[in-house]
Amino acid sequence: MIGKLNHVAIVVPDLPAATALYRDTLGAAVSQPVDLPPHGVTVVFVTLPNTKIELLHPFGEKSPIAGFLEKNPSGGIHHICYEVDDILAARDRMKEQGARVLGDGEPKIGAHDKPVLFLHPKDFCGTLVELEQA
């Protein structure tokens, strides 16, 4: 059911420093920062030949990743994102298999302007999983 690995998301305490690290030290192509107020994050995408790294930084006072940074002040891997052909069919299959879909269970538009859902980390070996419609 899952397709390609779309990205690995890393929460960072200092977005300009993390961007410079990937761009200047590792020589990767990086995007400009994009604020996503509905998601409470600012993102920078690092493009690799086979996937992307999504650098996440809190945006606004009610950012859902602020708590992550409080527990992990140096940052760290937040979630992995897999592509699926049909987000609604994937959601329904996950529910049938007993996996918990976070939020209200309805897809939201993600950073790539495509529908996304998140799955509870306790159902996936302690890893927050994002599904994105390809």
Image (cartoon, rainbow, N blue to C red):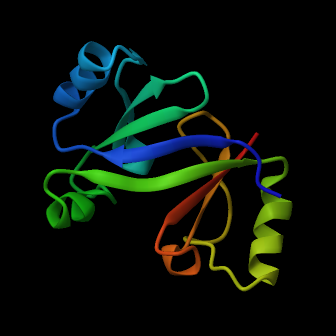
* Of the pair 80 and 111, the residue shown nearer to us: 80
* Residue at 36% across, 53% down: 77
Image position, residue 22 (x, y; %): 31, 24
Rendered-image quadrant of the C terminus: top right
* Of the pair 66 and 47, the residue shown nearer to us: 47
Image position, residue 78 (x, y; %): 39, 56
Q: Quadrant of residue 62?
A: bottom left
Against 8, residue 105 (above or below) is below
Left or right, 10 with reference to 104 = left
* Residue at 19% across, 25% down: 16
User: How many callouts does the rendering have?
Assistant: 0
Against 87, residue 102 (above or below) is below
Image position, residue 13 (x, y; %): 17, 44
Image position, residue 33 (x, y; %): 34, 24
Rendered-image quadrant of the N terminus: bottom right
* Residue at 23% across, 31% down: 18
The residue furthest front is 26
Against 57, residue 35 (above or below) is above
Left or right, 104 with reference to 90 = left
* Residue at 58% across, 50% down: 81
